[in-house]
């Protein structure tokens, strides 16, 4: 990073958050999500992943939650063991909830090119607040 860029990334909010925190984990190298050829059309798949963990990039404390992936496959289906390894790679990654859900959706869409997909993250309460984040592909899809 150079001068102006570095200053911008270090600029903090009143609570101490900065651009580095906001972008943490977005471009991290993660295992490939493998697929296999889909043999049928017009059906939906729901995958619940109750053991999601990551690290808060601001506090370095662990975050826990359930990721639910709901999609309609087109020509490829997600291979579950590869998906499990991909999700487990988040365990030591500093990333905010919102970024994790959107990154998972991006990587799933890149891997299998579904007709549509929704990724929902339901995160364990922290400080008395629980969060539920949902990202959709295509972005205009409304359930």
Image (cartoon, grey):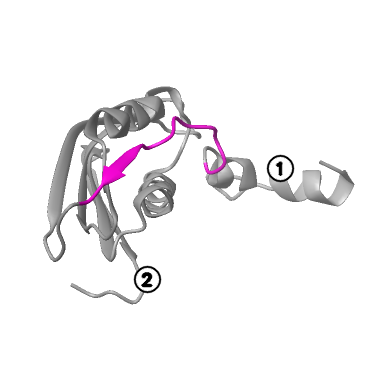
**89 on left or right of 122:** right
Q: Residue at x 36, y 58 (%)?
A: 113
Using residue 94 as the reference point, say whether residue 12 is left or right of it.
Answer: right
Image spot of residue 95 (x, y percent): 46, 38
Residue 80 sits above or below residue 13 on the image: above
The part of the chain drawn in magenta is: 26-38
Task: Give the percent coordinates (x, y) of residue 134.
Answer: 28, 58
Q: Which of 3/15 is in front?
A: 3
Quadrant holding the N terminus: top right
Q: Is residue 93 magenta?
A: no
Q: Give the class, few, some or many, for how many residues have Cα within 10 Å of label 1's Cα (few <14, many ≥20).
A: some
> Relative to residue 4, is residue 59 depicted above or below?
above
Q: Which mark is residue 139?
A: 2
**Residue at the spot of label 1:** 10
**Secondary structure of residue under mark 1:** helix
Counting from the top left corner in percent of width and height, residue 42 is at 13, 66
Q: How far apart are labels 2 and 1 at the CA level?
A: 31 Å
Q: Nearer the viewer, residue 87 or 115?
A: 115
Check the image and name the residue furthest to the top.
92
Mark 2: few, some, or many residues within 10 Å (few <14, many ≥20)? few
Q: Residue at x 54, y 35 (%)?
A: 28
Contact between marks 2 and 1 (CB within 8 A): the answer is no
Image quadrant holding the C terminus, namely bottom left
């Amino acid at each position: 990073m150079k001068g102006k860029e570095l200053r911008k990334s270090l600029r903090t909010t009143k609570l101490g958050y900065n651009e580095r925190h906001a972008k943490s984990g977005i471009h991290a190298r993660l295992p490939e999500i493998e697929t296999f050829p889909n043999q049928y059309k017009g059906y939906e798949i729901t995958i619940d992943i109750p053991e999601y963990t990551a690290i808060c990039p601001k506090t370095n404390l662990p975050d826990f939650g359930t990721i639910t992936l709901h999609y309609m496959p087109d020509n490829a289906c997600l291979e579950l063991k590869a998906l499990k390894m991909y999700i487990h790679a988040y365990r030591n990654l500093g990333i905010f909830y919102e970024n994790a859900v959107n990154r998972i959706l991006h990587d799933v869409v890149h891997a299998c090119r579904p007709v549509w997909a929704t990724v929902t993250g339901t995160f364990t309460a922290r400080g008395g607040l629980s969060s539920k984040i949902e990202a959709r592909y295509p972005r205009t899809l409304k359930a």
